[in-house]
Image (cartoon, rainbow, N blue to C red):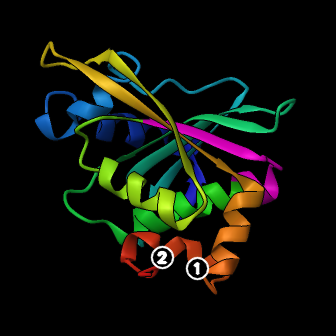
Amino acid sequence: MLDVAIRHNEELQIRYRETLFNPRYKFYLGFPEMLNFIPMADSGAIQMVSLNEHGAVIGYIGAKINRITKTAYDHESINFLPGKNDTFTQDIADFDLFLFNELGMDRIIWSVIIGNPVEKLYDRYVDICGTRIVGTFRNEVMLPDGQLYDLKYYEVLKEDFFRTIAKNGAKPSDYRNIGKEVYVQ
């Protein structure tokens, strides 16, 4: 379940600080720079938390919003639970649908550090939802291990997204199940 991040800021910051020196989170912590907290934006962004059935924070999802270009930039997410997390996957999908349907965004842009395990899911998403890989920047991000990594950018347009899932015989709400391998072609 999604909720506004500021309502859960204290718990969010505690969960985030637990990731700071955990190698599992090295791909998140290097982008854009390693901070000791997730800053709460005053404006120009939407920040939400993913909650489990007991109301505990299990993830964070955010994006910068440009209402003039109707674009959500720097879509970011962090799963605080180890392993696969269906609730969090569904909440990311609900967040994206919220961007398209409620906030009127026409485009979502995000990136992934090459080597991040979630890169495989994003590449698969390209084939499923009418997304495209925009490009790759070499040696763009330094991670806590001191190494430079490449950064791959993605873009999904609202019209392509809804056309592609309709072509696959799905409803927009089915988009929530991508992480569950629903769209096997």
Q: Position of residue 86 (x, y in %)?
A: 37, 71
> At which x and y percent is residue 75?
54, 39
Q: Is residue 58 left or right of residue 177?
A: left
**Dot 2: few (<14), some (14–19), or many (≥20) neighbours within 10 Å?**
some
Residues in magenta? Answer: 99-111
Q: Nearer the viewer, residue 7 or 3?
A: 3
Is residue 106 inside the magenta stretch?
yes
Residue for badge 1: 174
Q: Are marks 1 and 2 in contact (CB under 8 Å)?
A: yes
- Residue 133 in view here: yes
- Please tell me whether residue 99 is drawn above or below residue 168 in the rendered image: above
Q: Residue at x 32, y 66 (%)?
A: 85
Q: On residue 166, which mark appears?
A: none
Left or right relative to 47: residue 30? left
Give the vertical position of 116 relative to 169 (above or below).
Answer: above
| CA distance separating discs 1 and 2 | 6 Å
Q: Which residue type carries mark 2?
A: Asn
Which amino acid lies under the numbered mark 1 shown in the image of this protein? Asp
Instruction: Identify the residue under disc 2.
Output: 177
Q: Secondary structure at mark 1?
A: helix
